[in-house]
Image (cartoon, grey):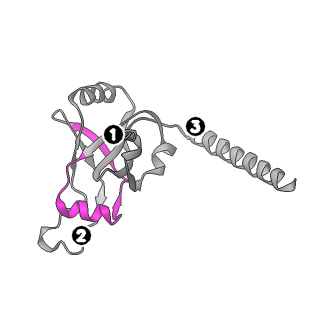
Amino acid sequence: MAQKTPPAADERKTSVARNPKATHDYHVLETWEAGIVLTGTEVKSLRGGKASIKESWARVRNGEVFLEGMNITPYEQGNRYNHDPVRSRKLLLHRQQIDKLIGAIEQKGLALIPLELYFLNGRAKVALALGRGKKQHDKREDIKRRLADREAARAMASARRGK
């Protein structure tokens, strides 16, 4: 009898775009994975890695979640079937998740920000985070902590090489 492989081993994740500034500007409170409604030429552009989510955000409109400001470069061979590069794109979430998001966004200072755009088993997904904006002193503390961690790692590496 053949053994089944665990489901996690079958999943293939290919990252298309990341938003490193999101963790710099926001305290990430909770994350969700959402599907995206795309056209054919948008998918072909994404497979080529032609996307940017640095200036994008998500919003709830009429009980649905939309990703705004994401730029997907038009597909070169798409001719007249090409899409608008920065159109708003609908995100696919369960009703319970959307209701939870609506409740969280109504609180002061919370925002929906995309962290990463990727393909999971051939389907386009976005990692969506609920975040609270950081103050300037929080950003400075994060930079100091990162520098201290980097220095400690460098010291450990040089100590290992010295032996």
Q: Which mark is residue 138?
A: 3
Residue 85 in view in this figure: no
- Considering the numbered disc 2 on the image, is that residue within a helix, a strand or a loop? loop
- The span picked out in magenta is 36-60
Residue 122 in view in this figure: yes
Instruction: Using the image as rendered, state which of residue 87 and residue 124 is in the foreground.
Output: 124
Question: For the point 12% across and 68% down, which residue is it?
Answer: 81
- Considering the numbered disc 1 on the image, is that residue within a helix, a strand or a loop? strand
Disc 3 marks which amino acid?
Answer: Asp
- Mark 2 and mark 1: span between their CA atoms? 25 Å
The quarter of the picture where residue 129 lies is top left
Q: Nearer the viewer, mark 3 or mark 2?
A: 2
Q: Which residue is mark 1?
A: 33
Question: In the drawing, does residue 50 fall left or right of residue 147?
Answer: left
Q: Pick whichever of labels 2 and 1 is earlier in the sequence.
A: 1
* Residue 137 sits inside the magenta stretch: no
